[in-house]
Amino acid sequence: MKQMLLLFAICCVSFIHSGAATAGDVSGKLVIYTSQPNKDAQQTVDAFKAKHPALEVDWVRDGTTKMMAKLRAEFTAGAPRPDVLLIADIVTMEGLKKEGRLMAHPDADIAAYDKGLMDKDKTYFSTKLITTGIFYNTAAPFKPTSYKDLLRPEAKGLIAMPSPLTSGAATIHMAALTSNPDLGWDYYKGLAKQGTIPNGGNGGTYKAVAGGEKMFGFVVDFLPIRNKLKGAPVEFVFTAEGVSAVTEPVAILSTAKNPAAAKAFVDFLLSLEVQKLAANQGYLAAHPDVDPPEGFPSRDTIKLMNFDASQALANDKSNKMQFIEIFGE
């Protein structure tokens, strides 16, 4: 009898250990759709695979707008491929959440993070802070500190900006500025009177100002900050009113075929180790304990503008129509 009890106990322990190993094992195939730059995406995937060598990772990269068009086509066909979505902005994620397209990850550890960066229902999680403010060529007639400075007469005809009809970051920036009671749509009307012609994305705006064709512009922070370190004649301004931010959120699709691996990937991105990797790649990490990259000010000096993703989603079409009325298509 004692031998039978002992054998039973051994079997139970063996089963528990086997089950724990299976639950913690990440294997199979994980499909990621991302808008990260190719180099950053490859570094991120390589670091994740080093921790989970049994896992096959297939990642597809494109801009957020094109990536979402691809995913929408897959939804229509009833065959969405990705387990994980890692894209530019939370407004897109908020839309997917409202459609029931995202899977919650209630065990994700976000205690260290600013609550405003995370979905309260834990369906998407911000991983970076890619802010948009103003920047200028060092040959500009003055050094701006406020958005309103670009309405000064000396700036007329000298302003470049990306279009929110093209750029996700510009869309977020437009929503943040126009919901600010001290700026609003009157500010964009003022920019139009200054002869500002929105065009393309952040890359073109950066080149126009860095090359001296224009003197001022709106752009994502890392372009002028990184290039200034290489000698470019540009300065980025974390404005008095605050900056807007896209936060490169990650989410698990409700149709994920490998949810265990998807949750492990989310946990990986939120870990202090990978937040430091983001800083090494030249971005502001979302984790408040990670030092900013070279060229950035300390985190406690950077003011983020108020932003409501749900409201921005609800107003997205009307905002873009208002923008077209002011600037044309």
Image (tube, helix red, strand yellow):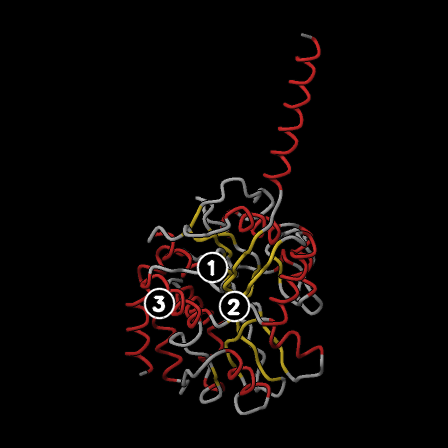
Depth check: give the residue in front, 33 or 214: 33
Depth check: give the residue in front, 183 or 86: 86
* Other-residue count near label 3 (Cα within 10 Å), few / some / many at <14 / 14–19 / ≥20: few
Q: Amino acid at mark 1?
A: Pro
Q: Which residue is mark 1?
A: 82
Q: Amino acid at mark 3?
A: Ala
Depth check: give the residue in front, 169 or 299: 169
Task: Tell me the quarter of the image containing the C terminus.
Answer: bottom left
Q: Verify CB contact (< 8 Å) between mark 1 and mark 2.
A: yes
Give me the disc on residue 60: 2
Sequence-first tag of 3 and 1: 3
Q: Residue at x 58, y 42 (%)?
A: 111
Sequence-first tag of 1 and 2: 2
- Can see residue 241? no
Q: Is residue 38 left or right of residue 91?
A: right
Is residue 262 shown above or below 64?
A: above
The answer to which image quadrant residue 135 occupies is: bottom right
Q: Residue lying furthest bottom in this view? A: 213
Sequence-first tag of 3 and 2: 2
Image coordinates for residue 160, horizontal then vertical, percent: 48, 83
Q: Which residue is mark 3?
A: 73
Q: Residue at x 36, y 57 (%)?
A: 95
Q: Verify CB contact (< 8 Å) between mark 3 and mark 2.
A: no
Q: Secondary structure at mark 1?
A: loop
